[in-house]
């Protein structure tokens, strides 16, 4: 198993407790009864959809892909599956849920990710930038190709962290503040 790096864990700790861009999930505010598509990484046995996520998303279409949302970016350094993942998300939203009412797509990144850690030298910060890029790409492409679905679909990025002490949690990613505090380089 890829263990992650001390500097990345330090960065994630800062995100969680200093800059607070990884706040807790609030089930009371985030119930999505009509349906959710959840895209997450399959390269680990860790539970990416913990109990609170099941309560928030009672009707869920699970898309487990190696690398998860980090591969929903054209030319991703991990190797992209941009087209196939987009087809899967659009299928999930269109074919498995009611034809009216709000829907959600949850993009769950995670650290440490074996796919990212073994194939690339991406830091946790760079991985979160990819996750945000995936969110923005999905918004743009859904709007272009399925405007009706785009209007009904909230896209929520989350980050699962398996801390070094064995604790595992899934947090919301406050992506707007993340971009302000940690602008992408180059
Ligand atoms: Zn992974």
Image (spheres, rainbow, N blue to C red):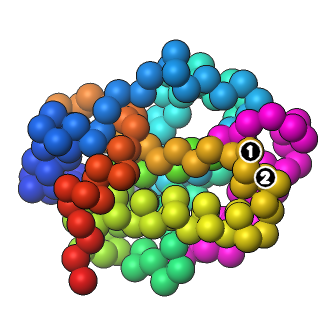
Q: Position of residue 40 (x, y in %)?
A: 53, 50
> Does residue 64 sit above or below 116 in this rendering?
above
> Does residue 121 sit above or below 2 in this rendering?
below
In the structure shown, which secondary structural element does the residue marked by tag 1 occupy? helix
Direction from residue 35 to residue 73 in the image, left or right? left
Q: Residue at x 22, y 52 (%)?
A: 3
Q: Quadrant of the C terminus?
A: bottom left
Residue stretch rendered in magenta on the structure: 80-104
Direction from residue 165 to residue 58 in the image, left or right? right
Q: What residue is pinned by disc 2?
A: 149
Q: Position of residue 161 (x, y in %)?
A: 31, 41
Q: What residue is pinned by disc 1?
A: 152
Decide: few, some or many residues near mark 2? Use Cα within 10 Å; few <14, some 14-19, many ≥20: some
Q: Which mark is residue 26?
A: none
Direction from residue 124 to residue 148 in the image, left or right? right
Q: Is 102 covered by the magenta stretch?
A: yes
In the structure shown, which secondary structural element does the residue marked by tag 2 occupy? helix
Q: Residue at x 29, y 59 (%)?
A: 179
Q: Position of residue 41 (x, y in %)?
A: 50, 53
Q: Residue at x 9, y 52 (%)?
A: 6
Q: Which residue occupies the foreground of this view, 102 or 75?
A: 102
Q: Is 182 covered by the magenta stretch?
A: no
Direction from residue 135 to residue 38 in the image, left or right? right
Give the quadrant of ligand 1: bottom left
Ligand 1 contact, mark 1 (Cβ < 8 Å): no
Residue 22 seen: yes
Q: Residue at x 52, y 33 (%)?
A: 49
Residue 13 seen: no
Is mark 1 in CB contact (under 8 Å) with mark 2? yes
Q: Position of residue 184 (x, y in %)?
A: 26, 71
């Amino acid at each position: 198993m890829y263990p992650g790096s001390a500097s990345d864990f330090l960065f994630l700790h800062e995100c969680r407790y200093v800059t607070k861009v990884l706040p807790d999930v609030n089930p009371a505010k985030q119930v999505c009864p009509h349906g959710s598509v959840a895209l997450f990484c399959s390269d680990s046995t860790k539970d990416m959809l913990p109990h609170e996520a099941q309560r928030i998303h009672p009707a869920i279409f699970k898309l487990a892909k190696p690398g998860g949302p980090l591969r929903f970016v054209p030319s991703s350094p991990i190797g992209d599956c941009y087209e196939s993942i987009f087809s899967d998300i659009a299928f999930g939203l269109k074919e498995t849920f009611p034809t009216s009412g709000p829907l959600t797509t949850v993009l769950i990144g995670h650290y440490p990710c074996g796919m990212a850690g073994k194939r690339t030298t991406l830091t946790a910060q760079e991985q979160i930038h990819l996750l945000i890029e995936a969110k923005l790409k999905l918004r743009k492409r859904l709007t272009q190709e399925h405007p009706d679905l785009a209007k009904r679909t909230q896209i929520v990025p989350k980050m699962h962290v398996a801390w070094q002490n064995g604790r595992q949690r899934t947090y919301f990613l406050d992506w707007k503040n993340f971009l302000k505090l940690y602008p992408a380089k180059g």
